[in-house]
Image (cartoon, rainbow, N blue to C red):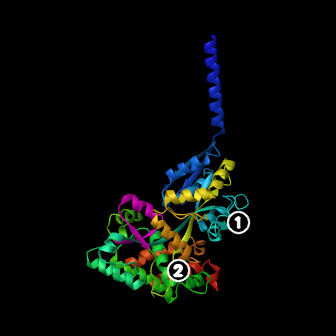
Amino acid sequence: MNRKQLTFMVVLCLVLLVANSALARTQTVSLWNWRGETEFWAAVEKEIRKEHPEIRIDYRTFIPTEYDSILMVGMQSGEGPDIITLRGGPGVAKFAEPGMVERLDKILDFSLFPEGALTQASMNAGVYGVPFALQTYQIYYNKEIYAKYGLKEPATWDQLIENCRVLQANGVTPFYFQGREGWGLSLVQTTIGASILGAEWITGLVKGKNAFTDPKFIDSLYKVLELKPFMQKNFEAASYSDMQMAFPMEKAAMTFGGMWDVKSFDQIAPEKEWGMFLVPPVKKTDRPYAYAYMDGAYGLNSASKNREAALKVLEFTTSAKFGQMFVEFNQEISPIAGIQAPAELTELQQGLKFVEHHALPDIYGVRSVLTFGVPDVHTLLGAGMQAILSGEKTPKQLAEELQTGIASWYKPFQK
């Protein structure tokens, strides 16, 4: 072997040595989620690698309705991810109670998070997840259609019904409803209930001073029935994804939707403009309320084999930088303090105002304390609303079912 060949071999060995060393240092953190955020997490990885070049994120997303069962099987079998996306409230407790996720408030800095968001990521005064989104559910409307018929955002429930009548008289379907999936109908009811019942009454319900069987709550169930004549034909067969496609394609003037729907609406019909408003109260002098809740949180698998790297990723999710990225990529509300919505995201700015000025202090549906036992109110409401809309059950019967079911395990209802 001559000198040139020897030099080449030495250089090659050094290159391979460096490459193998870099490969050995690479730490891959697995993360499971029910949200389709592949591009977002690729951007997060790029940002984290500026300080931690050895970290890679293996992001996997699952069908939302299948995610919970897949995650539980993975965790029980020891094949779960390093970082778990947990649903807020009972979703956190379900994995924290058996010790599947680590307590984080003694490891990470949560000073940028409001107490309300941390409460829904906690169990027994310990924080077990990093909250990532505050959600609101409201009524979206097509601004062009509203303008065409001279309609304004309603200030009262009767004005909303009158808007529906005007639209229907002009051959426009007022509301597009998804009736096939109970979870969406449960959100519709609690969104209506937020303004119809009001904050004081709902707080009384959570404390056990009021009951689902009270006439006031039964009336809030009837309010959904009042909208039935204004729904599209065969609404019972429509899925949530059907709604996400049909509304921006002008199959209806209005729909109930979450803050997370804005991005998909804009992608389908970028030339359209959407307005959004809270369900109006019965009286103009009453205050409308937003049913706002913490969507979920990132937890650390107690059995993670990449704990240090996973903690570095979780540390980034507590930062203002992550919160701003989350808002701009996903067009949703971050619970991290000081985050601003870009000027062009008008719906998101409106959502931030809903949370700041109209959020209920206590909630009674999804992610609430009434979902920590079995049967839970979110599941009962979903199936119950389907039964009411199909005529199989009356609002009074559903109210009794809710009261009996929750009282079977919720102590404030057992007085």
- Report whether 165 appears left or right of 140: left
Q: Which SS class for mark 2?
A: helix
Q: Amino acid at mark 1?
A: Gly
Q: Residues within 10 Å of mark 2 (few under 14, many from 20)?
A: many
Check if residue 265 falls in the magenta segment.
yes
Which quadrant would residue 108 be assigned to in this image? bottom right
Residue 229 drawn at (x, y percent) = 33, 79
Query: Which residue range is magenta in the image?
Result: 253-276
The answer to if 100 sits in the magenta stretch is: no
One can see residue 394 in this view: no
Q: Determine the residue positioned at 46% across, 76% down.
A: 278
**For the residues marked 1 and 2, what is the alpha-carbon distance in whole angstroms?**
30 Å
Residue 251 visible in the snapshot: yes
Q: Quadrant of residue 111?
A: bottom right
Residue 411 x/y as whole percent:
65, 80
- Give the mark, 1 or 2, whose residue is nearer the N terminus: 1
Left or right: residue 319 compared with residue 270: right
Along the line of sight, the residue nearer the viewer: 139 or 81: 139
Q: Which SS class for mark 1?
A: strand
Q: Which mark is residue 126?
A: 1
The residue beneath circle 2 is: 402
